[in-house]
Image (cartoon, rainbow, N blue to C red):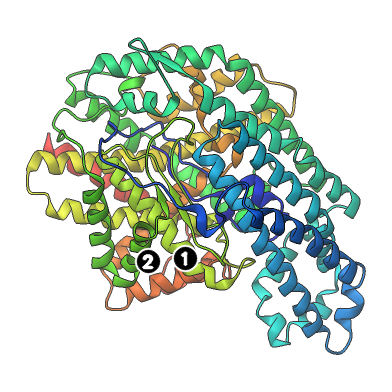
Amino acid sequence: MTKSATSRTTKSSRKPISSKAAAAGKAARKSSGKPSGKSQSAKLPEWNLADLYSAIDAPEIARDLDRIDADCAAFEADYKGKLAEQTAKPGGGAWLAGAVKRYEAIDDLAGRLGSYAGLIHAGDSVDPAISKFYGDVSERITAASVHLLFFGLELNRVDDAVIERAMETPELGHYRPWIEDGRKDKPYQLEDRVEQLFHEKSQTGYGAFNRLFDQTISSLRFKVGGKELAIEPTLTMLQDRQPAKRKAAGQALAKTFKANERTFALVTNTLAKDKEISDRWRGFEDVADSRHLANRVEREVVDALVSSVRAAYPRLSHRYYALKARWFNKKKLAHWDRNAPLPFAATGSIGWPDAKSMVLTAYSAFSPEMADIAKRFFDDRWIDASVRPGKAPGAFSHPTTPSAHPYVLMNYQGKPRDVMTLAHELGHGVHQVLAAKNGALMAPTPLTLAETASVFGEMLTFKRLLSQTRNAKQRQALLAGKVEDMINTVVRQIAFYSFERAIHTERRNGELTAERIGEIWLSVQHESLGPAIDIKPGYENFWMYIPHFIHSPFYVYAYAFGDCLVNSLYAVYENAQEGFAERYLAMLAAGGTKHYSELLKPFGLDAKDPKFWDGGLSVISGMIDELETMG
């Protein structure tokens, strides 16, 4: 199962506007390897992107691309080389506020163009015309936004006292969070022409290898039972009730991955080296420091999270998988059986209308306002749920730009886990709608909170389903399913983070062969999954299809951060007096205007407290305790 916010959900104060085209539709999809079930015969919704543009050849696209060209060039002519002098003058705050507003308007338009290109590409990444359109739009925005690179760099060179005085002007003070956020990047800025080179080369560097990954993974075919399947239905078979089908799917994945390992090793090595070059020039010490900076989270906080989760592996994943093996009357489960449906779980498919009702009912019980926002995704066709060839695997919610609205992509196949994915992505969507009022510069949320709304939406839905389940075995199955998902959210994602750290660290000493990458992968998998999972030959190449490693290096810890945070947050909710929902929605509506620590204060939570992470992990451990008592 995969799910996420998109990369544009992240804080982007130092990210060039052109990256929105490159990132649009490239979700940081949570790749646990846990797929959904059988496809449905009922008609599933497909999104209506006309709120952005009517078609790839719509005249409005050509018009807006020309407008971006003109606006970016005019912006540079009007402001380059003038920020320090003009801001220091009387009335400098109002003058600079006008510049920021113009920059924000360009950002919004670039977001609209880039989002449309990215979303339509996510809907069909193998159509040559769409791929060309996506690449052309990305290049046009990159070329135009070269004229904007000076702005953030020059703004950060303005004296602190001058900026502080200018922000006393209300018009500029409104943008204080964005300005202060950008100034945190000051130590890592390079000379203007070097920044321009990095910016322009991105299209033929990491942007090109991102596209190569997407097109390769979408075009792969896996031979299962005489049929040639794409990756999504093949992964789906790992959750089939028939053991022979799960084994066949696992072996088919291994065979095709093996045949393509050189391509994926090349992509991984190239992107790791590309990042190392950038990090070295900018002065980042640790391989993940640039991600921490973008997330506005301290390295020691992430290190504490990682240490807590790794220490908890034995009492979480190791214990649960041993329990699951026992349910199957085995000592060990083959890796392709890790996400097998439980023998006592209900069969059958959940229809789309029922999934919609389950999620909206759970949301409404918490907050009618939250449910009303989520309902718009269904009513206004902001969701693409069908499974079809060429469509991106997994799921995401893409916020597009504040002048429009978010869109959700998922591959709905009727299993309970798909209902949770719908709840997850709609949580993102509600968050993005609420934060949009902050404008294009301050709506994006740092990853430290980007997964909070989504995981909270899942928890609301799960708790409601659990409370309505009377059958003991079905309650056991529902609880076990939640534990599996939390393991995939916390344990698996921290294992992925450990894998990335090892890859990027070792890459500094030279290229890694596919075999060596596989060795590192197996090492972290053995540690995280534990002795009850029997890792068979072929699993060493399962790192190849995880999109985070390509699109969003080191994103993955955000899931564990969000899950542990939500466990603590939900405990506050269950014990709260009136007003929790209002405080929660206010937190979401803040977008990127406040640091995560400030947003958590009203709930009495402090992520810097070492006990914070253990508290979140104890919720998972407690659920496993309950499962052990059920037999």
> Disc 2 on helix, strand or loop?
helix
Q: Amino acid at mark 2?
A: Ile
Q: Residue furthest left?
A: 471
Evaluate if marks 1 and 2 touch, with contact meaning CB atoms under 8 Å apart: yes
Q: At x 71% / y 28%, what residue is drawn?
A: 270
Q: Position of residue 357 (x, y in %)?
A: 23, 56
Please tell me which residue is depicted at 81% across the width and 55% down the height of the picture. 189
Please identify the quarter of the rendering in which residue 363 is found: bottom left
For label 1, the residue is 433
Q: CA distance from mark 1 to mark 2?
A: 8 Å
Q: Is residue 619 visible?
A: yes
Q: Mark 2 highlights which residue?
A: 373
> 298 or 9: which is nearer to us?
9
Amino acid marked by disc 1: Val
Where in the figure is residue 235, as x and y percent of width and height? Answer: 38, 26
**Against 23, is 170 above or below?**
below
